[in-house]
C-alpha cells in the first residue's frame, strides 16, 4: 500500500509541473514533444517508486526510426505506464472518448494525435480505426491492447477485430508485445502494488508481406503474445 501511495503522490506532485510548464509550452509552440517527454518520464519514475523493476526483451530488433503497430496483452493498470515509455519514438494510443471533453486535457490529447474510442459503440469503433489510420499515416506508432479490456486471470481474452483491420489497411509492421508480471504486481480490482519484476517482450515484427489474411494475422499475434506468458497463463495445448 505504501508503494502505491508513493507512486500516486509522485504523480500528484508532478502533474502541476506539467500543467505549469508543459501545457503552456505545448499550446504556444504547437509542439507536443516536451509534454510527451514529461509524461513518459513521470510515468516511468512513478512505477519505479513502487519497487517494480522492468526487464525488456527484443527492443534491439526494432528500427528506432520505423513506424509500427504494437499489439499487447493487458492485465493491469500498470501496463500503460510501463509499456508506453519503452516504445521507440512517440506513439499514439486509443483512449476513452469522454476524456476529450475536458478542455485543456482534451486539447493536448488532440495535439498528441491520440484516438478517441467508444468501446460500446460498433460504429464508433470503425471511426476509431479510420482515425488511427490517419495517425499512422503521419508516421506515428500506434499501441493497442488487443483484448480491449484487462484480463482478470492473466490469460488472454478474445481479441478485438479492429486492430487487425487497421493493420491490413495501413500495411506497416505489427509487433506483438507480451507483458508478464503486472498481473502479480497489480491485478485487476487490486489497489495495492507488490514489488517484483515485470518482463516486457517485444516479439519479432510481422512484416506486411507475412500478414496473410486478417484471421491469419490475428492467429500469429495471439501465438506470439501467448508464448511469452508464464506457462500457467498460456492457453492449454491440446
Image: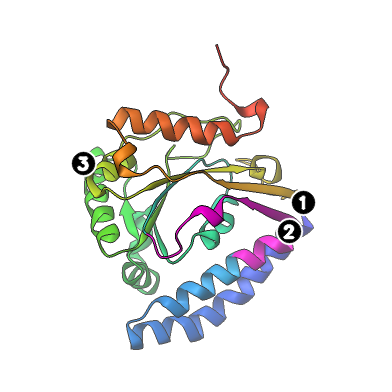
72 to the left or right of 186:
left
| Viewer-side residue, 157 vs 230 | 230
* 3D distance between C-alphas at marks 3 and 2: 39 Å
Choose the circle earlier in sequence order: 3 or 2. 2
Q: Which residue is drawn at 32% across and 28% down?
A: 215
Q: How crowded is mark 1: few (under 14 residues within 10 Å), some or many (20 or more)?
A: some
In the image, 161 versus 59, the foreground residue is: 59
User: Residue 176: x and y, percent?
Assistant: 47, 42
Q: Quadrant of residue 26?
A: bottom left
Residue at image point 36% right, 81% down: 31
In the rendered image, residue 61 lying in the magenta stretch gets the answer yes
Separation of residues labelled 1 and 2 (CA atoms): 6 Å
Pointer 3: what residue? 123
**Helix, strand or loop at disc 3?**
helix
Quadrant containing the C terminus is top right
In magenta, the rendered stretch is: 44-66
Of the residues under marks 1 and 2, which one precedes in the sequence?
Answer: 2
Say if 182 sits above or below 5 in the image.
above
Image quarter of residue 8: bottom right
Q: Do the residues labelled 1 and 2 touch (CB within 8 Å)?
A: yes
Residue 217: x percent and y percent? 35, 33
Marks 3 and 1, the one that precedes in the sequence: 3
Query: Compared with residue 81, is residue 236 higher up or lower down, i.e. above or below?
Result: above
Lateral position of residue 174 relative to residue 88, left or right: left
Kindly identify which numbered label has been placed on residue 50: 2
What residue is pinned by disc 1? Answer: 195
Q: Tell me, yes or no, if residue 42 can be seen here.
A: yes
Amino acid at each position: 500500500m505504501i508503494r502505491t501511495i508513493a507512486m500516486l503522490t509522485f504523480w500528484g506532485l508532478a502533474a502541476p509541473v506539467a500543467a505549469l510548464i508543459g501545457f503552456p509550452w505545448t499550446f504556444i509552440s504547437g509542439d507536443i514533444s516536451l509534454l510527451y517527454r514529461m509524461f513518459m518520464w513521470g510515468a516511468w519514475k512513478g512505477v519505479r517508486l513502487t519497487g517494480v523493476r522492468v526487464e525488456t526483451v527484443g527492443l534491439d530488433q526494432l528500427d528506432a526510426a520505423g513506424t509500427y503497430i504494437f499489439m499487447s496483452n493487458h492485465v493491469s493498470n500498470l501496463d500503460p505506464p510501463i509499456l508506453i515509455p519503452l516504445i521507440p519514438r512517440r506513439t499514439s494510443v486509443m483512449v476513452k472518448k469522454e476524456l476529450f471533453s475536458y478542455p485543456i486535457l482534451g486539447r493536448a490529447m488532440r495535439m498528441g494525435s491520440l484516438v478517441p474510442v467508444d468501446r460500446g459503440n460498433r460504429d464508433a469503433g470503425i471511426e476509431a480505426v479510420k482515425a488511427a489510420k490517419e495517425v499512422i499515416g503521419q508516421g506515428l506508432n500506434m499501441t493497442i491492447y488487443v483484448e480491449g479490456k484487462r484480463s482478470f486471470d492473466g490469460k488472454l481474452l478474445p481479441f478485438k477485430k479492429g486492430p487487425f483491420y487497421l493493420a491490413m489497411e495501413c500495411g506497416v509492421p505489427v509487433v506483438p508485445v507480451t507483458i508478464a508480471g503486472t498481473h502479480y504486481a497489480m491485478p485487476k480490482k487490486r489497489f495495492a502494488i507488490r514489488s517484483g519484476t515485470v518482463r516486457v517482450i517485444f516479439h519479432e515484427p510481422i512484416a506486411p508481406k507475412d500478414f496473410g489474411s486478417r484471421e491469419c494475422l490475428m492467429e500469429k499475434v495471439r501465438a506470439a503474445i501467448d508464448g511469452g506468458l508464464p506457462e500457467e497463463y498460456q492457453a492449454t495445448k491440446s
